[in-house]
Amino acid sequence: MAPEIPPWGAPLLLLPLLLPVLLVPPAGCGAGSGCGGGGGTLKPFDALYASGVAAFYGGDFAGAARCLERALRSRQELRNQRLRCRRRCRGQVRLQELGPGPGGDLPFFSSVLRRASCVRSCEERRLGAPSRHRVAEELRSDFQRRVPYSYLQRAYIQLNKLEEAANAAHTFFMANPEHMEIQQDIENYKTTAGKVSLIDHEARQHMEDYTAGVRHYDKEEYKLAINFLERALEGYYSEDEDCQIMCEGPQRFEEHEYLEYKASLYEAIADHYMQVLACKHDCVRELATRSGRISPIENFLPLHYDYLQFAYYRVGDYIKALECAKSYLLFHPDDEDVLENAGYYEGLLEGTMDPDTIKPRKEAKVLLRRHKLESHLLQVAAAGLGYTYTEPNYWNRYGARQDEHSVPSSISSEPEEGPRLSLTKKPTPKPDRELKEGGPLLYSDVKFVYNSQQLNGTQRVLLDNVISEEQCRELHRVASGIMLAGDGYRGKTSPHTPNERFEGATVLKALKYGYEGRVPLKSARLFYDISEKARRIVESYFMLNSTLYFSYTHLVCRTALSGQQERRNDLSHPIHADNCLLDPEANECWKEPPAYTFRDYSALLYMNADFEGGEFIFTEMDAKTVTASIKPKCGRMVSFSSGGENPHGVKAVTKGQRCAVALWFTLDPLYRELERIQADEVVAMLDQEQLGPSEMNINPRDEL
């Protein structure tokens, strides 16, 4: 019930762009030959990538692996060489200050020209002509999404290199946690190859060190936490410098067509510089964002100092504790808890040294001063030059430590006058509504089975007799007449597992088929009416104060494929959440695209039980610990809120066909299902013309 990215989707769409280089692969990348090094300048990574894709589809998996590996190395080396050249030229050619009077600008522009010449000659000497390494935006996106690792994984499988395949799959998955097929592949590797520790080849070291530091902090291993967090800070500032330098490369003029651009000298300089400056200013967000994510870790840089101030206190280094507390206060000078901490550390140091001599860390002061000046310049440009710019909140204080080390505490060994940690913890996201359940079921024949507590979760309900046996049979008959393989799954007949065939249909399609006489109109109308019945039940049971709208309605059947069921260890639908990207390793669910973030509630209404397997399961956010298992049967409906509080999946269907009506709902009318609106119009027309009155007996009774 989550968006699914085809493993080959992006590359296949790009084949027209790749054809010129596919036809002439770089030396050493052809079938049957090596893809090794060679003299001369760096090979363009897009050409190596294209050759790897061509080799893969040509069945040359060894050649594909060599070229794809080399493409990844070439892309990294391209960045490294550009960094070296720009850093070297920064040191060799200092920008001169503007002088007074006529010609006073000449020394400055002279230094600009000399630095530009330095960078150009250095890069041409190391990399060749700039045109060699110009890459289409679609290909650049492929590498950002780590698509080459998806190819590599499959090439390694063909070469029986399971460890390399597992690491490639893991690297791809870290940037694409919504990709169900890769997630299942990783589980298979762990089972078949005994591979437990996986390597992310594209991991950012400062982020890895930060994660390790927080992990040790949570275990109260403060010395180890300090080591990793200090190393993370060192890596952060190094990466920040690199990010700033890389922003000095070419920029796209978002509001101007370059060939028609006729700005004056200073307008042109301002246009380009503002885009460079916006890029540099956003390095704070870039360095705080995990691979494949859109949203950064809130308050990322200040959090380092927040963790460190308490960790240093716990190991008895009060000077460092005060230094880190003051560094944190640079970002949040009104944080009462850290102000109290700093005062406490100063008290501990009185008599041994003057606490005023302990200053915030220089690198934090420099970065924050630069960041504020960048913000000021961008806002000046927005006001005076017609730019559109809104300053993000880069240091959101809701992104604070979430630990249990509240001092003083009745279970703490610290004295009452000990430091109070920065306890402005990031609150649990508050929904824009009060969570309730237990409202009336509206229909006398509907039977309550389990609530959230009995299903070991939040906002969950299990009901029986939502539809009758006869209605199940009728719905199954209409399904067999309108469903198409792959409908609702971008045409993929096996979108979640190669061991089952998926078929589906929408309400609008059913009504159109009924109107055309291809299926009984009464049966098509049944699909429409029972989905509306389900919507009303969900809205009422969860006691929602606003209208619940359809977001998507899908009648779906999954059929076990004969000859492919032995030793199955996959799922029919891997564990996921419906409105966020489940990240089991981070124990997070990222509410950002491509997830359907507007979905609020989900429901599954089952039509049959004559199959084997196919149990619906809820899990913890680790996607492993099962909290509830539900066996489908005719008329049974499970409904739940669509967020990360309810990860769920479907066990393998090993025999027969499992059919259900899948429903997703939203509280936001902007995201109403378009086909549902059209279906409403069709039904209104049918009722008006009395072409197909519904004969369903689903009249709601009085509220219980």
Image: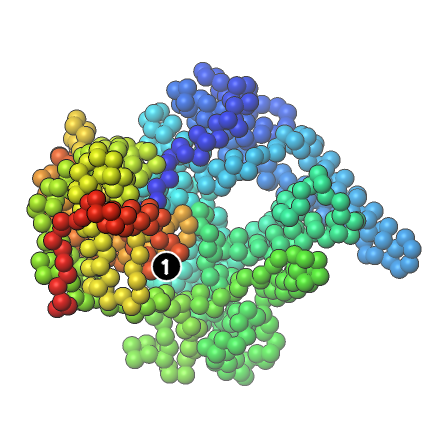
Horizontal placement of 466 versus 309: left or right? left
Residue 314 against residue 266 in the figure, above or below: below
Q: Is residue 592 left or right of residue 532?
A: right
Label 1 CA crowd tier, 10 Å (few <14, some 14–19, many 20+): some
Rendered image quadrant of residue 26: top right
Q: Residue at x 11, y 38 (%)?
A: 611
What residue do we see at 37% from left, 59% from top?
Answer: 668
Q: Mark 1 points at which residue?
A: 668
Q: Where is residue 364 in the image (x, y as percent from the top left)?
A: 59, 64
Q: Choose between 691 and 395: the one closer to the eye.
A: 691
Q: What residue lies at 25% left-to-right and 35% top-to-bottom?
A: 516
Amino acid tagged 1: Asp
Residue 238 in percent (x, y) is at: 58, 52
Circle 1 — which element? loop
Give the residue furthest to the front.
689
Image side of residue 657 versus residue 431, left or right: left
Residue farthest to the right? 102
Whether residue 167 is visible here, answered yes or no, is no
Q: Residue 346, position in %: x, y?
A: 52, 80
User: In the figure, 502 relative to 677: above or below?
Assistant: above
Tell me which corner region of the image, top left, top right, bottom left or bottom right, holds residue 504.
top left
The quarter in which the C terminus is drawn is bottom left
Q: In this view, does 296 lie above or below 613?
A: below
Q: Is residue 399 visible?
A: yes
On screen, 658 above or below 129? Answer: below
Residue at 85% over, 53% down: 105
Tell which of 95 and 437 is nearer to you. Answer: 437
Residue 549 place in picture, x, y as percent: 31, 56
